Amino acid sequence: MNGLYIAFEGGEGSGKSTQARRLAKRIDAVLTHEPGNTPLGKQLRQLLLGTDEAPVGARAETLMMAADRAQHIEQVVAPALAEGRHVVSDRTAYSSLAYQGGGRKLGVEAVRGVNDWALDGHWPDVVVLLDCEPGQGPRGRPGRDRLEQEAADFHETVHATYRAVAEAEPDRFVILPALGTIEEVEARVWSALAARFGWEA
């Protein structure tokens, strides 16, 4: 029996990386992230997010993210699921819907189509959206990579797109407040997932 594919999504500083680590440890899951968790992905991540690299156009950015994702699914996610392992990922294709579809104004459905092909059917079983206004995340910090350094209106659009996508897919998304202590957010995450999957609360 295949494992569960659980994703954490959210804007910059929302605490998703921390919560992904904690959940993966708690359920003994494979912990992974996008972009950059394969040898090819590491190269693509540098090109995509490095601030010293040449500018990347919006469509090229979308296709490079999808290429990273296709490799990630083939080399990391799909094999783990096939072995019955749960997979917890810090970001998935939903990041592209928000960042490239919304923030880059390429359109959510256009970006969804590119990623649907790249994922070969491996959309997450459940997505935990840690929700907070841009710049108000519990672990906010000055921008470091190319996307983090985008203007405020870009991040506001990303946030609004995340909310719209999540509200349109209530069977897949769990929307949780990102504000609070790490332990408080972790408790919210566990309570929501335990209720969904019948885990011991």
Image: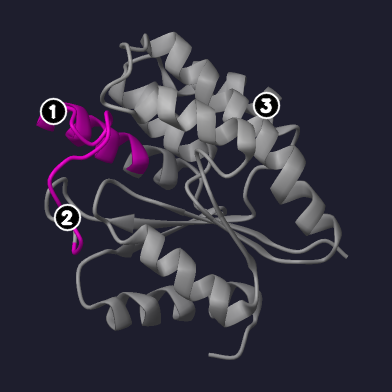
Circles 2 and 3: CB atoms closer than 8 Å: no
Circles 2 and 1: CB atoms closer than 8 Å: no
Q: What is the distance, in whole Å, between disc 2 and disc 3 at their CAs?
A: 31 Å
User: Disc 2 designates what residue?
Assistant: 140
Q: Which residue does the image show at 48% across and 39% down from the upper left?
A: 94
Q: Nearer the viewer, mark 2 or mark 3?
A: 2
Q: Which residue does the image show at 38% across and 82% down from the upper left?
A: 187
Q: Amino acid at mark 1?
A: Asp
User: Disc 3 designates what residue?
Assistant: 118
The location of residue 33, given as percent across then percent down, is 52, 49
User: Disc 1 designates what residue?
Assistant: 153
Q: Is residue 109 above or below residue 174?
A: above
For the magenta stretch, what is the residue range?
138-162
Q: Amino acid at mark 3?
A: Ala
Q: Is residue 132 above or below residue 188?
A: above
The location of residue 142, given as percent across then percent down, is 12, 46
Left or right, 93 with reference to 140: right
What kind of element bears circle 3?
helix
The mark that comes first in sequence, 2 or 1, is: 2
Q: Which residue does the image show at 20% across and 67% down from the upper left?
A: 179
The location of residue 62, given as percent across then percent down, is 47, 19
Left or right, 175 with reference to 178: right
Q: What is the distance, in whole Å, between disc 3 and disc 1 at their CAs?
A: 29 Å
Q: How is the image coloured?
A: one colour
Q: In the rendered image, which quarter is residue 82 located in?
A: bottom right
What kind of element bears circle 2?
loop
Residue 192 visible to the viewer: no
The mark that comes first in sequence, 2 or 3, is: 3
Q: Is residue 6 above or below residue 42?
A: below
Crowd rating for badge 3 (residues with CA inside 10 Å; few <14, some 14–19, many 20+): many
Q: Residue furthest bottom?
A: 200
